[in-house]
Image (cartoon, rainbow, N blue to C red):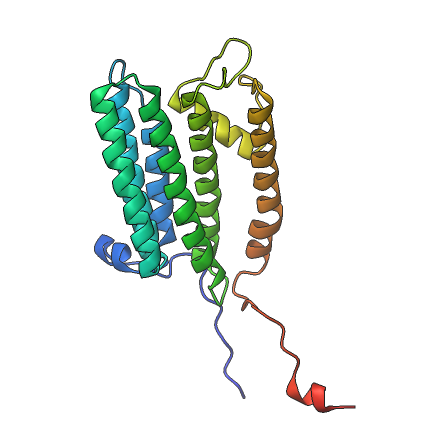
């Protein structure tokens, strides 16, 4: 009688591990998820008169989170090199321009553009690692949720860039460009299609970006995440190869 294959546990397979072991291990997407949530919390914190300082802190926290995402996703040397260059340019330009003129829209535009490129680069890396999981486990689901949050962060940086380059007010009804916290909030209520209506895009460009974000958010949830949850413990087939006996038959 053949031994039955045990289905891997959904969560808790690393129970008893130390924090150091979790940091060093691959596919620690539960820890990455917590770090992304911390990044979101920092992104909505504001200090009156210290906006330049908060911009620097947000960028540093974001770089730390993305560095861990690269590590836990077993990124290639090429990915590390590209992200290190982006992070260096982002930190130097953002802090440098902020020191010269704290109210400069140029520093805000550079910070937003740099953050978007960093998030996009790491998002691709996590997607590649996520796609290589041979069996759907709890870590696969946590990776999928992390990707979802990264998408929301990426769009919030796009809204920040639009506000910084001064293409007109980002939001209608006198809301102006909003604060960093309000742009993050708007990004995630758009991604989840909550649509409270307290912030409405003012220009056609912003409207089209919002529609794109909403479509991505809904399609992702009803396809990728739903399929993962329904196939926990199942082996993933990366390609369909005809059976040799079947090809030789007939």
The quarter of the picture where the N terminus appears is: bottom right
Asked whether the viewer can see residue 44, the reply is no
Residue 35 picture quarter: top left
Residue at point 34% right, 24% down? 106
Looking at the picture, does residue 91 appear above or below residue 49? Answer: below
Residue located at (46% from left, 47% from top): 147
Locate residue 105, reporting x and y percent: 35, 20
Q: In which quarter of the image is residue 183?
A: top left
Q: Residue at x 45, y 17 (%)?
A: 177
Quarter of the figure with residue 43: top left
Q: Is residue 126 visible?
A: yes
Give the residue at the far top of this rendering.
174
Q: Which residue lies furthest to the right in this view?
A: 250
* Foreground of the two, 45 or 211: 211
Residue 80 in the image, given as x and y percentages of width and height: 31, 54
Total tally of numbered discs in the picture? 0
Side of 88 relative to 127 (left or right): left
Q: Please determine whether, in this image, residue 160 is positioned above or below residue 142.
A: above
Q: Is residue 135 left or right of residue 39?
A: right
User: Which residue is at the front of the view, 18 or 163?
Assistant: 163
Kindly identify the residue that appears in the image at 55 percent across and 25 percent down. Answer: 206
Percent position of residue 45, x then y: 32, 24
For the C terminus, the quadrant is: bottom right
Examine the rendered structure and indicate whether residue 105 appears above or below residue 173.
below
Q: Position of residue 103 (x, y in %)?
A: 29, 16
């Amino acid at each position: 009688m053949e031994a039955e294959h045990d289905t891997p546990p959904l969560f808790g397979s690393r129970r008893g591990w130390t924090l150091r072991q979790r940091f060093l291990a691959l596919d620690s997407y539960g820890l990455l998820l917590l770090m992304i949530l911390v990044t979101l919390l920092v992104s909505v914190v504001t200090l009156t008169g210290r906006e330049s300082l908060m911009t620097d802190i947000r960028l540093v926290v974001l770089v730390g989170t993305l560095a861990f995402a690269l590590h836990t996703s077993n990124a290639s040397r090429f990915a590390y090199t590209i992200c290190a260059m982006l992070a260096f340019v982002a930190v130097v330009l953002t802090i440098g321009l902020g020191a010269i003129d704290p109210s400069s829209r140029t520093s805000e535009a550079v910070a937003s553009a740099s953050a978007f490129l960093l998030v996009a680069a790491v998002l691709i890396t996590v997607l590649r690692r996520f796609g290589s999981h041979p069996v759907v486990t709890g870590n696969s689901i946590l990776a999928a949720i992390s990707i979802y949050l990264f998408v929301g962060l990426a769009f919030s940086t796009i809204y920040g860039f639009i506000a910084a380059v001064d293409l007109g007010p980002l939001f209608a009804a006198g809301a102006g460009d909003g604060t960093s916290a309000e742009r993050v909030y708007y990004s995630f209520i758009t991604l989840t299609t909550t649509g409270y209506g307290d912030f409405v895009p003012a220009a056609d460009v912003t409207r089209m970006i919002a529609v794109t974000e909403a479509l991505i958010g809904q399609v992702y949830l009803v396809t990728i995440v739903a399929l993962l949850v329904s196939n926990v413990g199942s082996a993933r087939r990366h390609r369909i190869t005809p059976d040799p006996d079947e090809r030789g038959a007939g």
